[in-house]
Amino acid sequence: MIEAFIFDLDGVITDTAKFHYLAWKELGLKIDIEIDEEFNESLKGISRMESLERILIKGNKQNEFTLKEKEDLANDKNKYYVELIKHISPKDILPGIENLLKEIKLNNIKIGLASASKNATMVLNNLGLNSYFDFIADAAKCKNSKPNPEIFIMAANGLDVDPLNSIGIEDAMAGIDAINSANMYSVGVGDKDSLNKANIVFENTQTIDFNQIVNSY
Ligand code: B16
Ligand code: MG
């Protein structure tokens, strides 16, 4: 019996990945490290500080900054990011997602959020989707980034459901690994080859089919 659907945010509910990318790129200019779209892919689902670490390693500058300086850099990136997401509105909900949320609710199944983003609540508010969610896991309390299952387990606990009876939806490889390690059923959104560890994959949010998930679960 399915008790819950637990969603990732960036790349599943809305496309904030492009804003994360622009904000990291802006920070990259400051520390002279170039970030391209391909590298940005590897940052999807990864926490802010861990993303910064990966960027510094890419630029071979991992030993150039103190912890305080790194925190300041991460804060700078977040300032750029928050500025960019201020203008998000319901028109930025990815196609098919609001209908899917409605269908899940109609079937009396709980809905949770397992985003690595500390800005997740603000984004959901701007999208006007808050009322669909029974629990939003707090990324600030999560010690281990995806692919660690911690944020998905946190969401299942907050919803008071068994992970084995939960469906996780993700667009990033690290996220699919997190769902699988949490012992949930994994739904991938995106490229079949790169998300090949997911139990089922849909090409995009528009094609996510509630009945197909329920029947294949
Ligand atoms: P913040 P998700 C993740 O969100 C993003 O994919 C990742 O690129 C970002 O670094 C992370 O959130 C942290 O976000 O800086 O806003 O706390 O995909 O897990 O919803
Ligand atoms: Mg994502």
Image: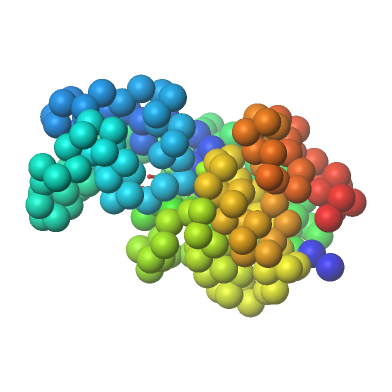
Quadrant of the frame with the N terminus: bottom right
Colouring:
rainbow
Residue 96 visible in the shown view: no
Whether 144 is drawn above or below 57: the answer is below
Q: Position of residue 172 (x, y in %)?
A: 55, 41
Residue name at image x 14 percent, y 31 percent? 31
* In this picture, residue 85 sits left or right of residue 80: right
Which residue is more in the foreground, 120 or 154?
A: 154
* In this picture, residue 58 sits left or right of residue 202: left
Q: Position of residue 42 (x, y in %)?
A: 44, 36
Quarter of image, res 164: bottom right
Residue name at image x 56 percent, y 73 percent? 158
Q: Position of residue 187 (x, y in %)?
A: 70, 47
Residue name at image x 36 percent, y 30 percent? 21
Quarter of image, res 194: top right
Q: Position of residue 97 (x, y in %)?
A: 65, 41
* In this picture, residue 213 sits left or right of residue 63: right
Residue name at image x 70 percent, y 51 percent? 186
Quadrant of the frame with the C terminus: bottom right
Residue 70 visible in the shown view: yes
* In this picture, residue 62 sits left or right of residue 125: left
Number of marks in picture: 0
